[in-house]
Image (cartoon, rainbow, N blue to C red):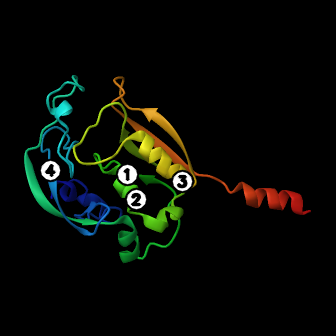
Amino acid sequence: VILQNKFSGYKKQFFLIPLAVDIKNSFREFNLAKHDDWGVSSLYKFSNNIVNKKRWIERNDFYFDQSINTMTIRLDTFLELYNLKSKISYLSIDAQGNDFRVLKSLGKKINKIKKGKCEASMKTKLYKGVKNDSKTIQKFLARNNFKTKVIEDDESRNECDIHFEKKKLKIIFEFIKNWH
């Protein structure tokens, strides 16, 4: 409701779909952080290191105010439902610990992505029960023909942004170059 009201003047450019993106079309508990900018709301609970402030001393917003049940959808399912067939120029993912699962939820449609960005944990596991570290995500993207660049988010190296871009197929370029 808050987002819908905030963007009510942009009805042609903004359409709120109350779903969480995950690896399964299902229902999950979603943890709401109604304080500050709501930016730490997540499908996951915080790891004990975060809650006890052993790892991220400068932050004091790692707690949830409420949990709700929400529907989840795979990104490839979403693309099919809305009949989105064209290439995706840029995919920005900030899913609070679920970024890797969002990428995996594209399935074969990951080939539609030209470039994008997601968040990952670095030296600190931020959430319980999920793998969302930078090395795992980079390996996955490399297997799917993306080059990556890691940009650290904070001086403590707790998390980072992974920028990714589809690699050009060198085989085709070599064939064309040698063809004439």
The residue shown at (35%, 50%) is 99
Q: Which residue is mark 4?
A: 31
Indicate the position of residue 109 as horizontal and vertical percent values: 48, 67
Separation of disc 3 and disc 2 at Cα? 12 Å
**To which quarter of the image does residue 7 belong?**
bottom left
Q: Cβ–Cβ below 8 Å for labels 4 and 3?
A: no
For residue 86, above or below residue 55: below
Q: Which mark is residue 60?
A: none
Amino acid, disc 3: Arg
Farthest residue toward the left?
66
Residue under the image location 35 percent in, 30 percent down: 123
Residue, far right: 180
Dots 2, 1 in contact, CB < 8 A: yes
Which amino acid lies under the numbered mark 2 shown in the image of this protein?
Lys
Q: Is residue 23 left or right of residue 83?
A: left
Which of the two discs, 3 and 2, labels the residue nearer the N terminus?
2
CA separation, marks 1 and 3?
A: 14 Å
Residue type pointed to by label 4: Asn
**Residue drawn at the location 12% of the way across and 45% of the way down:** 34
Contact between labelled residues 4 and 2, with CB atoms less than 8 Å apart: no
Find disc 2 in the rendering and name its residue: 104
Image coords of residue 157 (percent x, y): 37, 27
Location of mark 3 (residue): 143
Callout 3: SS: helix
State the residue position of label 1: 100
Q: Which mark is nearer the camera, 2 or 4?
A: 2
Which of the two labelled residues, at mark 2 and mark 4, occupies the earlier sequence position?
Answer: 4
Q: Amino acid at mark 1?
A: Phe
Q: CA distance from mark 4 to mark 1?
A: 18 Å
